[in-house]
Image (cartoon, rainbow, N blue to C red):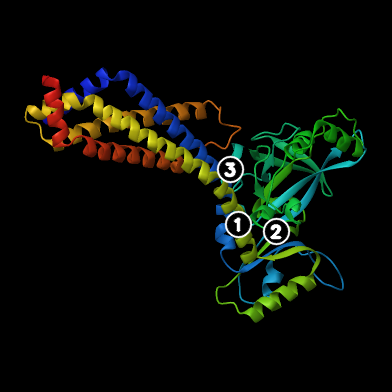
Amino acid sequence: MRIKLYGRVIGIFLKKHSFINVLISLQLIAVFVIGIIMTSIIDEKASSYEAVKPLLNGEGLYCGGYFLKDNENGGLLENTDEIKTQLKDVDFISSVNFASLQTGVDTQTNEVKTAYALVYDDYSANLFRPTIEKGSWITDSKQSDDIPQAVITRNYQGYNVNDIAEFETENGTLKVRIIGVIGDNEKYLGANSEYESNEPSYQLMLSTHFNCLNDQLKNKGFTNEEIALKLESLGYSADSIVYNEPVLFFTDKEWNKTDLDSVMSDSLFIKYNRNISDDEKLYNRKYINENLSVLSFAIQFSQLNNNSQTIVYRELYTLMPIMCAIYLLVLIASVSVNAINCKNNIRNEAILYLGGAKRKQLLTINVIYNGLICIVSLIISIAGSLIFYKAGLFSKTVITLGWKPITICLIVCAVYILVSCIISCIILTPKALKKAIILSEE
């Protein structure tokens, strides 16, 4: 009976003040959408660091360069077994190996075109999983095949999922089954030389690739004139569309099917045990310096972690004040709107109070009423965003609909309902209700 009464009263409130209810709903929808956008931006800024954080939290070294099998006789190491036997108090060693595959000859420059292949062991393949545009990542394949399987970046050859790509090697033509495609400008685990000169951070560990060199230069901020000059310096005409060779990603298990060599030259992760001593760290560092014949870098995890946190927090400090200011304005607006709404409905509530309704019941009606508007607005916001997301309208943005944006929206919803409860408690006092009754009688 009480629920039926509540529903009838709330229905009267919604109908009688439909215009202001629509304005409140539009305001809340805007807040929820802004919340989804801002949370997605913050999450995107931090997600790459969060992926590699478990590795960087411990002690160890991140290295790039070539290891010699023997300082006197030369030859390059192809796996981490020998290194691990030489280093002290090491938990594990993981690597991203490197190889190259010929794709043909450039008709304009007559140079051999080479696609790079990155070969991941089990740890590195799962440490950072790129966003896949089509198909699946190298660790997720369910196919059983004698042909080596790989993921490829978006490419001018048009290789797609389930296609058989062909490359020239010293052993003849190599066939590779494509199981996934990574889109332009998506991060993947691989040393990024552009960040070597900066304070080393997680950014040094992650690279990106563009199918078209023109797009790559534009992404770096080159003007059209600068792009034309760059192309001419490479031997192309100024108006040429130049394509980059793709990058392929293999697990070491799949790469072994090729019978080709790969070398440890891209990334090497040396994770120490927790109880490693300073003397053992010094010994390991000395061994790395003496045996990494071409040492690009050897950086401590702690240094990478500290610099990474500085970068992430700097970006968050830029975005958080904007987000807080928006929500502060919304909170002030919510107080004002709730106060107006409560004042508009006080005459009807005074009549209910005169008819025997308790103040607690009137407060409950107001909370349900405001909560209903808020929840409907939330549903519209999420449903609308989901429709746009499914339609691909967010494909070129960082906007996502994961649990974090939805959690923020639920928090905003809870705060709004709490504010409505507080405002109702302040305005719907027995004295105010009695005064409303007297004014209505006059």
Residue at position x 55%, y 60% in the image: 54
Residue 307 falls in image quadrant: bottom right
Q: Which of marks 2 and 3 is nearer the N terminus?
A: 3
- Residue 126 visible from this viewpoint: no
- Examine the rendered structure and indicate whether residue 124 appears above or below residue 236: below
Tell me where residue 109 appears, x and y as whole percent: 92, 37
From the viewer's perspective, tell me whether residue 118 is left or right of residue 399: right
How many numbered marks, from 0 up? 3
Tell me where residue 418 appears, x and y as whole percent: 29, 41
- Examine the rendered structure and indicate whether residue 430 appears above or below residue 44: above
Q: What residue type is labelled 1?
A: Thr
Q: Name the residue under label 3.
A: 143
- Residue 48 visible from this viewpoint: yes
Residue at position x 76%, y 33% in the image: 157
Disc 2 crowd rating (10 Å Cα; few below 14, some 14-19, many 20+) is few
Give the Cα separation between the discs numbered 2 and 1. Answer: 10 Å
State yes or no: discs 2 and 3 in contact (Cβ < 8 Å). no
For residue 310, the mark is: 1
Q: Earlier in the sequence, mark 2 or mark 1?
A: 2
From the viewer's perspective, tell me whether residue 58 is left or right of residue 113: left
